[in-house]
Image: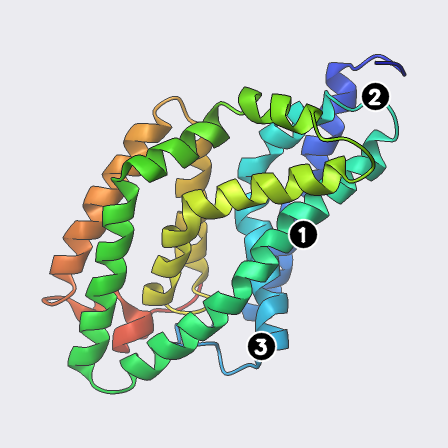
Amino acid sequence: MTGRPVTVRSTAGPAGLLLVAAAAAWIWVVTHWGGMQAMPGTMGVGLPAFLAVWTLMMAAMMLPATAPVAALYARTITVHRAARMVVFTIAYLLVWAAAGIPAYWLATGLGRAAGLSALAGTAVAAAVFAVNGVFQLTPLKDRCLAKCRSPIGLMLRYASYPGPSRDLRAGAHHGAFCLSCCWSLMVVLAAFGAMNLWAMAVVAAVITTEKLAPGGRLVARAVGIASIALAAAVFWVPALAPGLTGGGMAGA
């Protein structure tokens, strides 16, 4: 391997840029959607607008937890580091943007179910909480989370990717792992309402803690147990799921 030596400063830059991008996404979301009431479904927008907002939401929520992996990946790059890390990040976000398509149709279906009756909305909310709770406790969640928490194996895999497509493939591959790990937490956002900033902040904090904190695996299990508890509690307190029961929780 040739090129300039890899230093802590040179790899901290890419991680810092991801944090700056996440901060910019948060600022945009808060500026444009702060103060909105929780609403079911797709916020009343079409697929293109939904995908744009969804991708910004994912950038805000996911990039902070991804920054350490990006810094580690940057250590494997010795030339054109900044440009190649941009490709890695774009590929990562494209995976989440693609996930916005099924998310749109799921949000559409959940919104219609919530509009049928209060009981239907409550039942859907309970199902959403239960699905997340069960997934958080599965071995599949553990395996996906382990890849994110200890990504050395991934780095070895990415180093084997040949040619100029390496950064694109690496970013997409890591994005797919993050999606596999966190999809059920994103579904839970529907229960709290589209663009509910408090819910976004809590879910982002859970994801970051799961991936980076020493006790992240225990946090994942605790969130699973809490989610199952919410699946039962929402029948007595429908306002726990304002996005599906009409609780009207403010977005910020």
Quadrant occupied by the C terminus:
bottom left
SS assignment at label 3: helix
Between 156 and 77, the one lying in front of the other is 156
Q: Is residue 79 left or right of residue 182?
A: right
Q: Which residue is mark 2?
A: 78
Amino acid type at circle 1 is Ala
Q: Residues under labels 2 and 1: Cα distance?
A: 28 Å
Residue found at the very far bottom of the displayed protein: 116
Mark 2 or mark 1, which has the lower sequence index?
Answer: 1
Give the crowd class for mark 3: few <14, some 14-19, many >=20 residues within 10 Å.
some
Give the crowd class for mark 1: few <14, some 14-19, many >=20 residues within 10 Å.
some
SS assignment at label 2: loop
Between 7 and 127, the one lying in front of the other is 127
SS assignment at label 1: helix
Task: Tell me where residue 7 appears, x and y as whole percent.
Answer: 77, 14
The residue under the point 78% across, 40% down is 165
The colour scheme used to paint the residues is: rainbow
Q: Is residue 161 above or below residue 33?
A: above
Q: Nearer the viewer, mark 1 or mark 3?
A: 3
The residue under the point 59% across, 28% down is 68
Q: Is residue 195 left or right of residue 32?
A: left
Q: Which residue is mark 3?
A: 47
Between 238 and 112, the one lying in front of the other is 112
Give the crowd class for mark 2: few <14, some 14-19, many >=20 residues within 10 Å.
some
Say which quarter of the image contains residue 105: bottom left
Say which quarter of the image contains residue 58: bottom right
Amino acid type at circle 2 is Thr
Task: Tell me where residue 215 appears, x and y as whole percent.
Answer: 34, 24
Q: Which residue is mark 1?
A: 24
Total marks placed: 3
Quadrant occupied by the N terminus:
top right
